[in-house]
């Protein structure tokens, strides 16, 4: 299961990292709309919570190992989903708007690609 999740998350991070670098001009308005849509935010947060909890239950310990990195991703998903559901809408909107800027897409996209290459590369046996 660890290898499957590393492949899945690795490829996802690579694809989303590349998309955030190439398509940030179209992503920024979509995220702006997401920030103002409370219902959509709640549904996405509920789905993210289930996925994050599944990962955390399967891999509870954060470490520098492959399983530990997968666990860290799961904890981040749980925390993000709880923030979206539990915090006041104005706080969440302000928080999302503060990060919905081109420089964050450059940094986040690059970081996602690096993390994705490590996860997928390790899982597919390239490292």
Image (tube, rainbow, N blue to C red):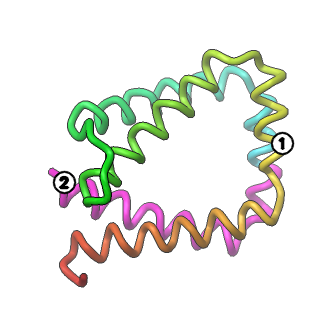
Residue shown at the point (37%, 35%) measured from the top left? 51
**SS at circle 2:** helix
Q: Are marks 2 and 1 in contact (CB under 8 Å)?
A: no
Q: Residue at x 18, y 54 (%)?
A: 2
Q: Point out residue 60 in the picture as x, y percentages from the top left corner.
A: 26, 36
Of callouts 2 and 1, which one flags the residue occurring earlier in the amino acid sequence? 2
Extreme residue in the left direction:
1
Magenta includes 14? Answer: yes
Category of crowding for the residue at label 2, using alpha-carbon neighbours closer than 10 angstroms: few (below 14), some (14–19), many (at least 20): some
Q: Is residue 70 above or below residue 77?
A: below
Specify start and end residues of the magenta stretch as a single range. 1-29
Q: Nearer the viewer, residue 4 or 27?
A: 4
In the rendering, at what x and y percent does residue 109 appear?
62, 67
Above or below 105: residue 33: above
Q: Nearer the viewer, residue 105 or 34?
A: 105
User: What residue does disc 1 label?
Assistant: 97
The prevailing secondary structure element of the residues shown in magenta is helix
Q: Is residue 19 left or right of residue 55?
A: right
- The residue to which callout 2 is attached is 2
Q: Residue at x 34, y 29 (%)?
A: 53
């Amino acid at each position: 299961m660890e290898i499957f999740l590393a492949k899945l998350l690795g490829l996802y991070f690579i694809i989303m990292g590349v998309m955030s670098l190439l398509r940030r001009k179209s992503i920024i308005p979509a995220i702006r709309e997401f920030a103002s849509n409370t219902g959509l935010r709640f549904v996405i947060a509920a789905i993210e919570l289930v996925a994050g909890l599944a990962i955390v239950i399967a891999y509870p310990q954060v470490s520098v190992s492959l399983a530990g990195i997968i666990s860290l991703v799961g904890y981040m998903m749980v925390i993000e989903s709880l923030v979206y559901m539990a915090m006041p809408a104005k706080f969440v909107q302000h928080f999302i708007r503060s990060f919905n800027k081109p420089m964050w897409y450059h940094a986040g996209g690059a970081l996602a690609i690096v993390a994705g290459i490590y996860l997928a590369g390790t899982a597919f046996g390239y490292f």
